Image (cartoon, helix red, strand yellow):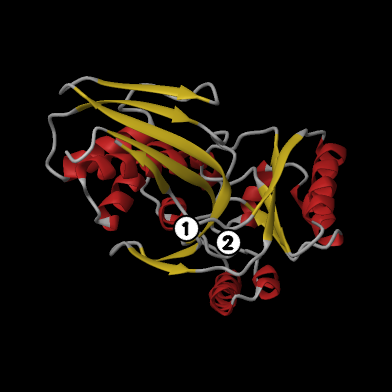
Amino acid sequence: MRYNKAVISSPATLANFGPGFDSFGLCLDSPRDTVTIQLRQPGRREVKVSGWSGIPTDPEKNTASYAAMRLADMCGCEEYGFSMTIKKGMKPGSGIGSSAASSVGGALAMATLMGVRDESLILEAAAMGEELIAGSRHFDNVAAALHGGFTVVSDARKRTILRIKPPSFQIVVVLPEISVETRKAREVLPKSVPLSDAVSNLSMAAGMVHSMMKRDARAVGEYLDDTLSVPYRKKLVPGFDEVRKSALDSGALGVSLGGSGPAVFAITLENASKIKQAMVRTFLESSGLESESFITVPGEGAIVEKVS
């Protein structure tokens, strides 16, 4: 091992990002998890978590420690021990990639200690951590958290990730006081959809990628729509339609669900505070839900803060 201790800052993300179901991801500059891993004597592993209650401290059930262990396993290092501390910056089940942030933090921390620079291994280990929560291995959140910017999982079988620098815009995120489990959000999706919906999403996804490459924020907002998952998942978020309308009426360029929800986000070039206030107020008035909210911008991905 090159080092004994690594500290990683790993960001929140917005999966799907409109029409990119299980494919698109946008990294947020904040909030972030901080994952610290310290190597110990072989065999002993412990995890401590602060910031939110209810997060597993069993190394085999915590996404960050699980991802770290799988990274070490893939590198042939089975006899090792560590202590890990996780300072959560985001609530689990909120729709902004909480589990992915921890998974990427754990995988990158272990990779840093082992001198591993193969991003494909780090990504795979992080996705294994995500699998603990989602029930299957998804790459949209972890790809965005690891690489930063706007990412496209263009081939999940080959783990091919496209990275695009997004235009400058502000992101308003509103988190109503409910939780949506990823597994449940997947269960409400239909097994098949009308051909017209599939064609619509394909068109919007192509437009989204082109807009990102052209760095055209207004066009990104125009393509921030979905016909494959949001029409079904919005039922899990009371007041979604009303909140979406209030954001657009206040000047938002586009509005959608963050991941599987309940986060609702809007993008804008101006009036972010006005849009945030309108969304929070509408959640309360339409469904009686209090909300947390924040304003951020596209981020650069996970960062190695310190090694020693």
> Is 41 or 210 nearer to us in this picture?
41
Q: Quadrant of residue 270?
A: bottom right
Q: Confirm or deny contact between disc 1 and disc 2 (CB under 8 A).
A: no
Kindly state the secondary structure of the residue where label 2 is placed. Answer: loop
The location of residue 184, given as percent across then percent down, is 53, 39
Judged left or right of residue 92, residue 134 is left
Residue at image position (64%, 71%) is: 220
**Figure check: 231 above or below 260:** below
Residue at image position (32%, 31%) is: 37
Whether residue 135 is visible to the viewer of this picture, yes or no, is: no
Judged left or right of residue 307, residue 300 is right
Judged left or right of residue 246, residue 43 is left
Q: To which residue does mark 1 refer?
A: 148
Say few, some or many: other residues with alpha carbon within 10 Å of mark 1 (under 14 / 14 to 19 / 20 or more): many
Residue at image position (28%, 64%) is: 158
> Is 70 or 164 nearer to us in this picture?
164
**For discs 1 and 2, the disc positioned in front in the rendered view:** 1
Tell me the amino acid under the disc marked 2. Leu
Residue at image position (81%, 61%) is: 248
Q: CA distance from mark 1 to mark 2?
A: 25 Å
The location of residue 186, given as percent across then percent down, is 51, 47
Q: To which residue does mark 2 refer?
A: 228
Say few, some or many: other residues with alpha carbon within 10 Å of mark 2 (under 14 / 14 to 19 / 20 or more): many
**Mark sitting on residue 248:** none
Tell me the amino acid under the disc marked 1. Gly
> Which numbered disc, 1 or 2, marks the residue that appears first in the sequence?
1
Say which quadrant the C terminus sits in.
top left
